Amino acid sequence: MFLKTVAFILLAFLVQRAWKLSLGFGTSDVGYINRPGPCRNVAPIETGSEDIAVTSNGLAFISSGMQLSDMCSSAVDARFSQFVGRIYVFDFQNSKQDAVEVSLPKELQYNFSPHGIDLLEDSETGEILLFVVNHRKIGEFVEILSYQPESRSLSMVRSVTHELFTSLNDVLAIDRNSFLVSNDAYFRSCWRILEPLLGLRWCNFIYFDGTVGQSIIENGHDFNSVALSRNGKQVYLTRPSEMKLEIYNRSKGTETLKLHQSINVGMAVDNVFSDQSTGDLWLGSHPSLALLTKHLSDIDLRAPSQVIRIQPLGPQNDPFNTYKLFSPFGDDGELVSGSSSAVHFKDKLLIGTVAHKVAYCEVQS
Amino acid sequence: MILKATVLLIALFALQRVWQLSPGFGIHSKGYIHRPGPCRTVKPIQTGSEDITLTDNGIAFISSGLRLNLCKQLFDKKIQQFTGRIYKFNFNDPGHAAVEVALPRELEKDFNPHGVSHWKDASSDELWLFVVNHRKDNDNVEVMKYNHELNSLSLVRSVQSTMFTSVNDILAVGPNSFYASNDGYFHGCLRPLEVVVGLALGSVVFFDGVTASLVVQRQSDLNSMALSKDGTRLFLTKTFEQQINIFNISKENGNLMFDRAIDVGVSIDNIYADPVSDDLWLGAHSSMFLLSQHMTNLDVKAPSKVVRVHPLGLETDRFESYELHSPFGDDGRLISGSSSAVYYQEKMLVGSISDTLVFCDIIV
C-alpha cells in the first residue's frame, strides 16, 4: 500500500515535470525560413559565435569556439573538445570584410573556452574593455581584457574567479572592475541534467564589486543572459526553459534587483541585446530545444534558428508596459544552426550561434 | 469493476485526444510580426476573405462574409449579420480597392460563400467561378460565368449532392467538373464533439459533370485543395494534423491515390499552388486556441501566419524534399485568423476567416 502511494506520487511528479518542461521543449517546432533582407554567412567562423558585444561605432566582438565538453562530455559531440576558443572582431561599417581573429593574452592561449561577452567603452580615452566568461579547465572565470586596435590583440587586465561562480553564462560590465554575472546551473558536470528534470533551484545571479562577490538573486534556475537598459535603470535577464525575458528594476550602487515584469516570448530565448539607440531588445532564440540538444550531440544535425525583437511601446519609466513581438529572421538551420545571439546596428543584423556559423543580414523589411 | 475499467478507458482516450490535438492548438504560440515588404489592408473588406482564387493574369476573386454553420452559439453574434459577397482584386492595379462583383439574382438572398475556385478556357478566355455556398438548407456548389464588362456573375448551374455533408473547399478541374472537400459531417453543435472525439467523417467528392463519387473517405480534419502545375497531383490540407496530403490523380476516373504527407508544423487552412514555381502557399493559424477565442469574440485578435512550401525534389517527386518559409506573420492587429494566401509577381494577398484582407509587396 505504502509502495503504491510512493510510486503514484513519483509518477504524478514526473508527469508534472514533463508537462512543465514540454512547453519550452518544442518537439514539433519547425524552423521556418524568413529574412529581413539579404543574408549570408561571415567567414571564417564555423565553430560557434555564442555571444556578441558591439561598440557604439559598430565594432562587434564575437566569442567563438566554446568547448561544451566540460559540460557532460558524453552528451555532446566529441568534436567540441577540438574547438579552439577565440575572439573575433567584425566591423559593421566594413561589412564586406571577413571577421578577424583577435590575439589573446599569453595566459589564455590553450586555456580559453569563452561564453558570454560584454564591453565597456571609455568615452574619454576610447579604450575598449572586454569582459568574457571563460570556462577554464580549473574553474569558472571572468576575464577582463583590454583591446589594442593597432595590433588587434587583447591584453589581460584582470582575471576574476569566485566560489559563487558555479556555471557561468553571461556577464554585464558595470565599470572597469565590477560586473554582474549569471549562473545557468549549479553543476558543471553531467549532474547538471538533473537540475531542470527535478526543478532544482540552485542557481544565483552575482554582483562582483571589484573585491567582493555576492548573490543578488538566489534560489533560481536557468539564469542565462543579461543586458542593461538604455538609462541603466533596468536589467534584463533571459530564462530559456520558461521562454521568458525578465525585467528587474535596478538600484545603482548597491546593485539590488527587484523583479518588475516577466515577458513570455513564446520560445526558448538565449542571449539578449539591448539596442541603445531604440530601446528594442534583440534575442537569439531556439524554436526547438529538442532539436538544439540533438544538434549539440551531433553538430551535423541542424537546429532551427530565430531572432526575436521586442519593441517597447510604454512610457519612459515603464517602457515594456506594452510591447510588440517581431521575428525578423528565421532559419531551418542550414544558414545558421542554434542561434544564440542577435545584435543590431544601423539596419544590419549579426546573428551568432552556439556551435555553428554567423549570419550577417541587411534589414530591409 | 467494469465501471472502473470504463472510466479508465475514457480517461486514457481523452488524454490521447488532448495529446493529439495539442500541437495544433498552440496554447502558448505567439504571433510574431514579420513582413516580406510593405503590407496594408485592402478596402473595403472587413468581414472576412476566407478563400481566394487567382487567375493566371493576376485577377483574384475573394469570398467574403462567411457565416460558419457549425454551432452558431459558439461564435460572435456579429458574424450572423455578415453579408456574403464575392470581391475582385487586380494584382496589376494593386492601388485600387477590391470591387464587389454582382451576384446572380437567384443567389442574392441565399449566399454564404466558403471555398472558391475558377476555370479558364485557354482559347476563349471564358472564366467560370466555382463557389461553395452554405445555403439555408444544403451546401451547394455554385458554378457561375463571369462577365468582364459588367463585373457580374451569372448562374450556370447549382450542384447539389447527398455526398456534400459539410463542404469547405472546391477545386475546379474543368468547366463542369470539380473536387469538393467535406470537412466533417455534423452541422450545429454536434460538430465540436465530432472534432474533439476525432470522428473520421470527412471526405472528398469528385463531380465529373454528371455524377458524384467519393474519392477520399473516412478522414477527419480535411480542409482545402489545390492542383499541381502539371495537373497530375492534388494537395489536401489537414488543419489540426498540420499536414498537406499529396495525391496522384487518375486521368480516367479522377480517383485519388495517396502519395505522401508533408508536415508543415502549424495549423494550416487554405492552400494555393503557384502555377509558375510549384510553391505551395498556405494561410495558417499560429494558435487554434486564440483563433477559437477570436471566433467567439471578434475583438480578440488571432495571430496570423503565411507558410510557403518550396519543393526541392526532382520532377518525378517534387516534394520528396522541401523548404518551409514563412514570409508573413502578424499578431492579429493587421489581420486576424489568416486562412488563405496567394502570390503573383512579387506581391501577395492574405485572406482571413472573418477579418480583413491584406496586400503585401514582396521585397525580401
Image (tube, helix red, strand yellow):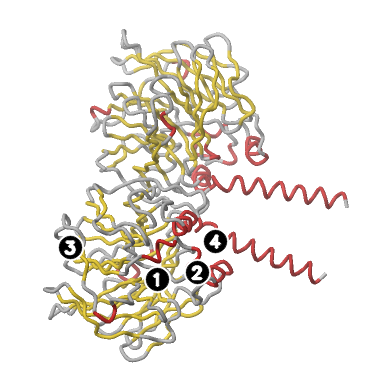
Give amino acid for label 1: Leu
Secondary element at tag 2: loop
Against B285, residue A246 (above or below) is above
The answer for which chain carries disc 1 is B
Which quadrant would residue A39 be assigned to in this image?
A: top left
Secondary element at tag 1: strand
Can you tell which of label 4 and label 1 is closer to the viewer?
4
Marks 4 and 3, how far apart at CA:
38 Å
Evaluate if marks 4 and 1 touch, with contact meaning CB atoms under 8 Å apart: no
Evaluate if marks 2 and 3 touch, with contact meaning CB atoms under 8 Å apart: no
Against A9, residue A279 (above or below) is above
Give amino acid for label 4: Leu
* Same chain letter for marks 2 and 1: yes
Q: Which residue is mark 2?
A: B71
> Viewer-proximal residue, B122 or B115?
B115
Residue A194 picture location, percent across and down? 66, 38
- Binning the other alpha carbons within 10 Å of mark 3 as few (below 14), some (14 to 19) or many (20 upward) gives some
Q: Earlier in the sequence, mark 4 or mark 1?
A: 4
Q: Which mark is residue B90?
A: 3
